């Protein structure tokens, strides 16, 4: 037992060891991957082979004084013609550019023929082929050049064009990457229908991309391999694509192996007593345990199972909801504080900044009961926080938690409207800080969409799980109701059979006992021993027959044994035995049966009806009644008739359940029964029993 437990623990520890190794590798390569962008070179010649003529000339220009220059063109324009003030403004701005930057030559204005435009060529060899220096030079010129009062100033030229193209392509790379990840995420969620399984391929691809970036940085440092933004982007896309493909392949193969061999985790399969077929009315052993046994013998759920249980649970009915939300608010506040201390993103926080930042986590305590109000409260704290240009990244944890709650607890339409509203408010607030920050926020708004999408996915997954549980409970209730209905029908059938059997047997025994007593008391000196013996033999036969039928009827109440061991149903072939027993009791019975094979349920019902009718005739029709039993098949039904010429039951007697049971038995197979006195004396019982199996409800016993 100890060795088995040790082996189980080792098997369970293997996945965690593998995950730990991957995390350790990611921690090691993470800093190196972060430096990958620092070694990228995006000069024009960096995209060419080292042996190309343009590459050789560029290297020579870097070594010579006054190498490659950055050329700009400043264009001043006013509709209707430039004024003298406009020309002085242009000259002053150009002079400011010359003072702040090292220019190759003094800029000279070139006016247009109509006097509405003035152009200044500006050139500098300071940036050389350094892309960052070129961008800084272009941005500095644009900050100085500016027009007011109808004067428009534009900065163009080859250098400005290269800077603008670099910014456009830098934005396109991030947008394309986010769009690709979004499409892959949607496909994975649709395939796996799980809020977490889609993270496995993406996480694997992300780790592969980090390792590739670290390798690229190492190659540059060790072997001076040129790394450009284009080659880095292509490598990232290829690694992400290949990593996702291989991760999907591995997940698919693992799922196939699970279908073939089953999981090695004992918690993922039913217990042996759950899988084994159980007798009717028996529950699995774990259901018959008392609470102490259940607690001591059931294994504790694993961490992953507890996480999935928390995800599947309705957030409004989860236990300790307020306590968990308070802990989440504290965690968000702590994470925000850590981000402020470790990440440089905006100006430092003073007392108002700390107040707004920490206050933004407080509404999360009520996020389950009032998700929209909690989000509005968070926005009310975060909006002025960003407007004052405090640390921007620190306020994101509380905002993302509130957004996720709104998406996970509301309808998709409300989630979309809330997402659009949050993005609009955020961009509007950042516009008050700077246009650059607003554009940057709009570019990274994919994180907001990702959080909302994650919440919607979790909500749909919860609905899916709730639907499965509800269908299972409904099926269980249906099975229980069907079982109760069958038990009630079986009890009613047994009660009818016992009534007919006991009434018939006791009546015959009473009549036969009376005959024996009459023979003994009539003339003791001339005792007819043969008549007494015959009467006693009849009583014994009746008892044996009753005992056999009683055993067959009560067999259904036993817990063990299969239905096949209870014997066949009585049918029309047993009517002759009933007639013979009635004749022995003194009745003059005439039998007429003109029917072929009938369904077992119909035959059993007809047998019981004839048995009850003959019993009533023997008991109530008087001494030696004339009884006629007729069974005939016509028009797809079995017609049954039992008539006698007796006097009927004595008035004032206690009514029994014979006729009621006969009508219930006829209805059980879809038939009808009529019983009552005849016009010319006597009593008649008639029934019509359909022979169509679909109309019968009495099954084999």
Image (tube, rainbow, N blue to C red):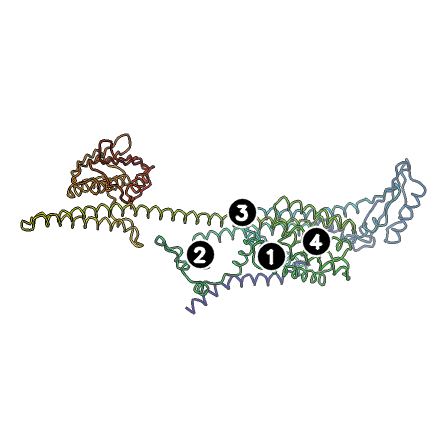
Q: Which residue is mark 1?
A: 207
Position of residue 632 measured from the top left corner of the image (x, y, whole percent): 23, 33
Q: Which residue is mark 3?
A: 191
For disc 3, the neighbor class at 10 Å (few under 14, some 14 to 19, many from 20) is: few
At 79% from the left and 46% from the top, the residue drawn is 160
Mark before the other along the chain sequence, 4 or 1:
1
Dot label at residue 173: none
What whole-number distance in Å separates the C-alpha atoms at marks 2 and 3? Answer: 23 Å
Q: Which residue is mark 4?
A: 377
Q: Is residue 532 visible to the viewer in this orientation of the structure?
A: no
Task: Give SS at disc 3.
Answer: helix
Q: Pick whichever, 641 or 511, lies toward us.
A: 511
Labelled pair 1, 2 in contact (Cβ < 8 Å): no
Which marked residue is nearer to the observer: mark 4 or mark 1? 4
Q: Which residue is mark 2?
A: 269
Mark before the other along the chain sequence, 2 or 3:
3
Q: Is residue 644 visible to the viewer in this orientation of the structure?
A: yes
Position of residue 71 measured from the top left corner of the image (x, y, whole percent): 82, 47
For disc 1, the neighbor class at 10 Å (few under 14, some 14 to 19, many from 20) is: many
Image vertical order of residue 576 relative to residue 5, above or below: above
Which marked residue is nearer to the observer: mark 3 or mark 4? 4
Which marked residue is nearer to the observer: mark 3 or mark 1? 3
Mark before the other along the chain sequence, 3 or 1:
3
Seen as rendered, the residue at the extreme top is: 635
Task: Give SS at disc 1.
Answer: helix
Mark before the other along the chain sequence, 4 or 2:
2
Mark before the other along the chain sequence, 3 or 4:
3
Task: Give SS at disc 4.
Answer: helix
Seen as rendered, the residue at the extreme left is: 526
Which marked residue is nearer to the observer: mark 2 or mark 3? 2
What whole-number distance in Å separates the C-alpha atoms at marks 4 and 2? Answer: 46 Å
What whole-number distance in Å separates the C-alpha atoms at marks 3 and 1? Answer: 22 Å
């Amino acid at each position: 037992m100890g060795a088995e437990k040790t082996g189980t623990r080792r098997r369970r520890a293997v996945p965690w060891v593998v995950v730990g190794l991957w995390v350790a590798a990611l921690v090691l390569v993470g800093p190196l991957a972060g430096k990958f962008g620092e070694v990228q070179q995006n000069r024009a010649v960096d995209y060419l082979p080292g042996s190309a003529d343009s590459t050789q000339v560029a290297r020579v220009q870097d070594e010579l004084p006054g190498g490659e220059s950055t050329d700009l063109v400043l264009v001043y324009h006013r509709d209707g013609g430039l004024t003298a003030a406009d020309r002085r403004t242009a000259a002053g701005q150009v002079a400011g550019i010359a003072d702040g930057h090292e220019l190759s030559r003094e800029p000279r204005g070139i006016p247009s023929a109509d006097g509405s435009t003035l152009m200044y060529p500006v050139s500098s060899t300071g940036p050389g082929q350094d892309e960052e220096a070129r961008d800084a030079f272009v941005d500095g010129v644009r900050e100085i050049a500016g027009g007011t009062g109808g004067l428009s100033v534009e900065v163009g030229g080859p250098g400005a064009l290269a800077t603008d193209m670099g910014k456009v392509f830098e934005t396109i790379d991030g947008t394309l990457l986010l769009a690709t990840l979004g499409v892959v995420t949607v496909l994975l969620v649709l395939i796996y229908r799980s809020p977490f399984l889609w993270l496995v391929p993406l996480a694997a691809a992300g780790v592969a991309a980090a390792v590739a970036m670290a390798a690229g940085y190492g190659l540059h440092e060790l072997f001076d391999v040129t790394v450009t933004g284009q080659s880095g982007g292509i490598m990232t896309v290829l690694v992400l694509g290949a990593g996702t493909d291989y991760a999907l392949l591995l997940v698919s193969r693992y799922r196939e192996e699970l279908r073939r061999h089953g999981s090695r985790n004992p918690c993922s399969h039913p217990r042996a007593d759950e899988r084994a077929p159980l007798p009717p009315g028996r529950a699995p052993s774990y259901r018959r345990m008392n609470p102490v046994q259940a607690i001591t013998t059931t294994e504790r759920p694993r961490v992953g199972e507890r996480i999935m249980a928390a995800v599947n649970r309705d957030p409004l009915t989860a236990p300790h909801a307020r306590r968990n939300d308070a802990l989440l608010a504290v965690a968000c506040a702590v994470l925000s504080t850590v981000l402020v201390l470790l990440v440089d993103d905006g100006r430092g926080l003073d007392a108002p900044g700390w107040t707004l930042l920490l206050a933004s986590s407080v509404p999360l305590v009520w996020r389950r009961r009032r998700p929209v109000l909690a989000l509005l409260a968070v926005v009310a704290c975060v909006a002025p926080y960003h407007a004052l240009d405090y640390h921007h990244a620190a306020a994101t944890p509380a905002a993302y938690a509130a957004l996720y709650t709104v998406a996970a607890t509301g309808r998709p339409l409300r989630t979309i409207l809330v997402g659009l509203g949050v993005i609009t408010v955020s961009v509007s607030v950042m516009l008050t800080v700077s246009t650059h920050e607003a554009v940057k926020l709009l570019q990274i708004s994919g994180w907001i969409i990702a959080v909302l999408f994650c919440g919607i996915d979790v909500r749909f997954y919860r609905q899916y799980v709730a639907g499965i549980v509800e269908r299972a409970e409904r099926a269980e209730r249906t099975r229980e109701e069907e079982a109760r209905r069958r038990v009630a029908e079986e009890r009613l059938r047994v009660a009818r059979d016992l009534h007919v059997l006991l009434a018939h047997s006791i009546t015959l025994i009473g009549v036969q006992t009376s005959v024996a007593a009459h023979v003994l008391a009539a003339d003791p000196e001339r005792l007819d021993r043969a008549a007494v013996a015959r009467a006693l033999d009849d009583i014994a036969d009746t008892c044996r027959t009753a005992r056999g039928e009683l055993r067959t009827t009560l067999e259904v109440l036993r817990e063990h044994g299969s239905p096949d061991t209870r014997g066949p149903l009585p049918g029309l072939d047993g009517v002759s035995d009933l007639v013979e027993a009635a004749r022995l009791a003194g009745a003059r019975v005439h039998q007429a049966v003109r029917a072929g094979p009938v369904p077992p349920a119909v035959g059993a019902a007809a047998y019981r009806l004839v048995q009850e009718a003959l019993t009533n005739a023997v008991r109530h029709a008087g001494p030696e009644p004339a009884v006629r039993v007729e069974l005939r098949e016509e028009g797809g039904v079995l017609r049954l008739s039992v008539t006698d010429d007796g006097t009927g039951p004595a008035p004032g007697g206690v009514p029994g359940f014979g006729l009621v049971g006969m009508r219930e038995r006829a209805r059980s197979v879809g038939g009808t029964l009529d019983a009552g006195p005849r016009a010319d004396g006597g009593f008649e019982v008639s029934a019509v029993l359909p022979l169509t199996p679909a109309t019968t409800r009495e099954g084999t016993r």
